[in-house]
Amino acid sequence: MFTVSDAAKAELANRLQSAGPRFVRLRMRDSCLLSLKLTLDESPQPGDREIPIDGFSFLLNEGELHYLRGKTLDYIPDQTGFRQFEMV
C-alpha cells in the first residue's frame, strides 16, 4: 500500500505517546493540489479501512486509497523550515 519513513515513524510515535489516540487518520484535502491531512483518532468511521504498517494503525477512507498506493509517508521541512507530513 504505502511505506513510512523513519522520520515519520519517530514523529508519529511521539504524537501518539502524548496524545493517547490509537489511530492515525490520513485524508486527502479537497484542493487542486491533493495535499495530505494527518490527524489522530480514537476509532474508525464508516467507510474507513484500517491498515497496520510498522506498528501503527492507519485509517484511510476507501475512496482515497488509490492516492496513497506506492507512496511514502514522510515528515519533512517545507520551504520555510516548518516540518510537516507529506506523501512522496
Image (tube, rainbow, N blue to C red):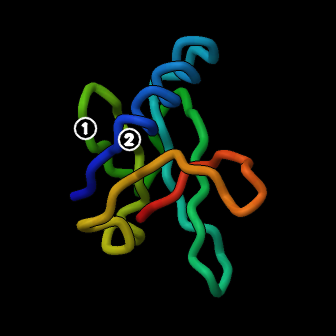
Q: Position of residue 32 (x, y in %)?
A: 64, 87
Looking at the picture, tell me which residue is in the foreground, 14 or 61. 14
Determine whether the residue tagged by mark 2 lies in a helix, strand or loop: strand
In the picture of the structure, the residue carrying the numbered disc 1 is 53
Q: Is residue 9 left or right of residue 25?
A: left
Residue 2 shown left or right of residue 38 in the figure: left
- Is the residue 76 above or below the residue 78 in the image? above
Element class at badge 1 = strand
Rate crowding at label 1 as few (under 14), some (14 to 19) or many (20 or more) other CA atoms within 10 Å: few
Residue 44: image tag: none
Count of numbered marks: 2
Callout 2, which amino acid? Phe
19 relative position to 88: left or right: right
Left or right position of 71 against 77: left
Position above or below: 69 against 32: above
Label 1 or label 2, whichever comes before in sequence order? 1
Residue at image point 32% right, 50% down: 49
Q: Residue at x 27, y 44 (%)?
A: 51
Q: Residue at x 45, y 26 (%)?
A: 10
> For the residues marked 1 and 2, what is the alpha-carbon distance in whole angstroms?
7 Å
Residue 87 is drawn in which quadrant?
bottom left
Residue reaching furthest to the right: 80
**Mark 1: amino acid:** Ile
Q: Are marks 1 and 2 in contact (CB under 8 Å)?
A: yes
Residue placed under numbered mark 2 in the picture: 58
Residue 13 coordinates in the image, percent (x, y): 46, 22
